[in-house]
Image: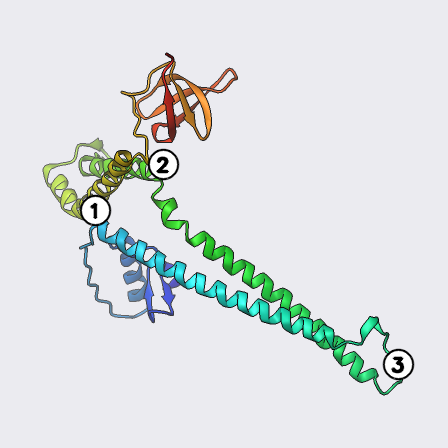
Amino acid sequence: MKTVGWRWGRSISAWFVPQSRDRLPKLHTITRTKSALEAAGFEVETEIDSSHRTTADVEAGKIERQADRVDALAAKAERKTSADDAAWANAQAAHDRLPEGGEPIKVGHHSEGRHRGAIARADNAMRKSVEASADATTAQARADAATHTTDARYSPVTVANRIETLGAELRKLERRITAQCYDDTRGYLDATAEQIQARAKRLAPHLDEKRDQIAYWEAVRAAQVASGKATGYDRSTVTKGDRVKIRGQWREVVRANVKTVSVTTGYTWTDTAPYAEIQQLVRPE
């Protein structure tokens, strides 16, 4: 199962395909798995469900799971911090039980064994305190990072880039419906009506999924522009000579392209940046 892309989930006590939640079935993985199991002597039946939840439901689920993860990591960080405090208190107590003033061990004296034991216990307690402090620091860092995950996923630039990526994926799927076929003797041939119909039927769930995702993220983008969280500049609002603020730096516009803007760098070459990265715009006048 592992060799064909599956993993064992201890929390669900079942085999699963990584990164398959709320996504259409990975038919190539399923087919490869079925063939491998049959070659091993098993009888295999497959039941494939191509239905999927709306992007709005999927995103709501992700946000809820991330919130639960933040709470769990925060609780873990609190436990680790308490353990760190307790370990430090134990280390201090063990240190206080040592003879005052750094008294050396009296070799051969009846107190030698007790003295060596006290030093070993103090050393062990301090080591545990250092380890507990490192665990607490790591747990707190993970908790802090988790609190920003959803915000980073919905940042204006990320949302705009995601829309562009999904649009490219949709166009690629649409091209596959009418793509030419290659024949060894006749070369590339136009797809027949039957082939186009079969491809359209097979790719319909994937097309619907991409269109639903695009609609959701475009609505998010529109809301961000309306609220002022995103700027919403494009080729129609940016012209040569304008000054734009990109990543905290002001640049002069050299050319407004279809999807990007070309700006000066202070050198002989120019840089390009997506319109979504424009934070502010000032006209020459």
Nearest to the observer: residue 135 or residue 78:
78
Describe the element under mark 2 as helix, strand or loop. helix
Sort mark 3 into few (<14), some (14-19) or many (20+) by Cα contacts within 10 Å.
Answer: few
Q: Amino acid at mark 1?
A: Glu
Please tell me which of labels 3 and 2 falls first in the chain. 3
Nearest to the observer: residue 110 or residue 203:
110
Question: Which residue is the site of mark 2?
Answer: 157
Please tell me which of labels 1 and 2 falls first in the chain. 2
* Residue 24 drawn above or below residue 261: below
* Residue projecting furthest to the bottom: 110
Distance from label 1 to label 2 (Cα)? 22 Å
User: Is disc 3 in contact with disc 2, using a CB cutoff of under 8 Å?
Assistant: no
Sort mark 1 into few (<14), some (14-19) or many (20+) by Cα contacts within 10 Å.
Answer: some
Q: Amino acid at mark 3?
A: Val
Q: Quarter-wise, where is residue 50 in the image?
A: bottom left
Q: Where does residue 15 sit, x and y in percent of width and height?
A: 33, 66
* Residue 255 drawn above or below residue 136: above
Q: Amino acid at mark 2?
A: Val
Question: Which residue is the site of mark 1?
Answer: 209
Sort mark 2 into few (<14), some (14-19) or many (20+) by Cα contacts within 10 Å.
Answer: some
Q: Where does residue 261 sit, x and y in percent of width and height?
A: 37, 22
Question: Which residue is the site of mark 3?
Answer: 107
Describe the element under mark 3 as helix, strand or loop. loop
